[in-house]
Image: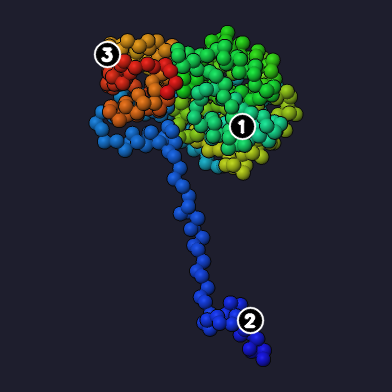
Amino acid sequence: MQTVLAVLCLVPAAALVRGAPSRVAATPRKASPSAYLSEIPQGPPDAILGIAAAFRASNADDKVNVCVGAYRDDVGVPYVLPSVTEAERRLLDRGEKKEYAPIEGLADFRQKALEFAYGEDCAALKEGRIAGVQTLSGTGACRVAGEFYARFLPEGTAVYVSDPTWGNHIPIMELAGLEVRKYRYLDRETNGLDYEAFLEDIDAAPAGSVFLLHACAHNPTGVDPTRDQWDAVSKKILAKGHHVLMDCAYQGFASGDAEADAFAIRKFLDDGHSLLLAQSFAKNFGLYGERVGTLSVVCKDTEEVERVMSQLKRIIRPMYSSPPIHGALIVKEVLSDDALRAQYYDECAQMAERIGGMRVRLREEIEAAGSEHDWTHVTDQIGMFAFTGMTSDMCDTLTADYSIYLTKDGRISVAGVNSGNIKYIAKAVHEVTHGKEIGVAA
């Protein structure tokens, strides 16, 4: 009897029902654990890096890459600063170890990086009132800043970004759980600053919002406020009690003068803002792949610094544990040595001078090709990018018919323009804009 019961327990209930087949149905095969992968949709390519990939895949002999913001010399070759090469040689000669950095990064690098941004004589730095951590370049700094705001500002606080802004700003902040809104910045009729609208949107935002500002060489427009305009922006933000996240990716690379390019940072510090600074050394040191940056938070005293640092480290530890050291050691070496620092400043000025010269020549060549448009905005703007005012259709035509690869908002990386391709680019720009309106949103 016990044997019969045991057998019955092994038979599915359906097999015991009158009229059911006498044979036990086979157990269905379980789906593979990786079956979920077949349901994952194809994601869109990155707006910038996807275009760079398309450029690499092109077989056109006359193809031109004016998309990615990476410096090239006048023959289109990536440029390694001689001061960086010398710093690397010294690191090798000293036998620098490859140990993990602390969560907050290398102390000597952080000190030199913050002095570079805030000034060697900065009182807040000397008083120990600025909390600073090493980050994965400026992108990592913005990501940590977004997480910091999401944890410690009131729920529902929005981050305001310029219209337009660097494309990665919006997903960075959204993935940190923050609402992203836009403030008017570019006047698309003139390709200059929409100054009054900028001030109006600061005033209209709910008190205590976050305003993400570009310290210099605004990306993608190349349009910066004047010093007087920065002063008015600073006062308006203070009056509304807003917080400021300043993104500094081009210090020294914009005008060729690192001290001049730090004007907005130092003004906002002196004016007493609730200030976070995201700092990158990709462009100005040519350290694109080294991922060198900092995030700093201006505090009221050293006790506040200690608490802020503890929370920044709590954010970083599960995110990427600790930053890479090689690029940080290079920056520290350059900024710590008087002769090497002077050499670096000269090299940085030369890069900025070449880009400025290409702006002038590009405008001249477009005009010489017969264009009747006003291209003064190309020379009025500053930094790596020229915001041309071309529509997305014009940009598509440049790529399809001329193999000139650029972003669909009409932004051109002037670093990709050189003596060998400038006439070709200028003629193509004239061809796609001839008889059509520019300076209006696509």
Task: Kindly state the secondary structure of the residue where label 2 is placed.
Answer: helix
Task: Kindly state the secondary structure of the residue where label 1 is placed.
Answer: strand
Residue lying at the far top in this picture: please name it.
Answer: 228
Q: Nearer the viewer, residue 383 or 150?
A: 150
Q: Is residue 225 visible?
A: yes
Q: Nearer the viewer, residue 387 or 313?
A: 387
Residue at image point 50% right, 34% down: 291
Q: Amino acid at mark 2?
A: Cys
In the picture, measured across the screen, residue 178 lies left or right of residue 351, that is right
Q: Amino acid at mark 1?
A: Glu
What mark, if any, has residue 282 been given in the picture? none
Q: Is residue 176 above or below residue 296?
A: below
- Count residues near mark 2 (Cα–Cα under 10 Å), then give few for <14, some for 14-19, many for 20+: few
Residue at numbered disc 1:
179
Which tag is nearer the camera, tag 2 or tag 3?
Answer: 2
Q: Nearer the viewer, residue 174 or 18?
A: 18
Residue at numbered disc 2:
9
Q: Nearer the viewer, residue 39 or 250?
A: 39
Residue 345 drawn at (x, y percent): 47, 18
Residue at image point 62% right, 18% down: 202
Asked whether the beta carbons under mark 1 and mark 2 sit within 8 Å of each other, the answer is no
Q: Amino acid at mark 3?
A: Ala
Q: Is residue 36 above or below residue 428?
A: below
Residue lying at the far bottom in this picture: please name it.
Answer: 1
Task: Kindly state the secondary structure of the residue where label 3 is placed.
Answer: loop
Residue at numbered disc 3:
369
**Quadrant hosting residue 352:** top left
Q: CA distance from mark 3 to mark 1?
A: 45 Å
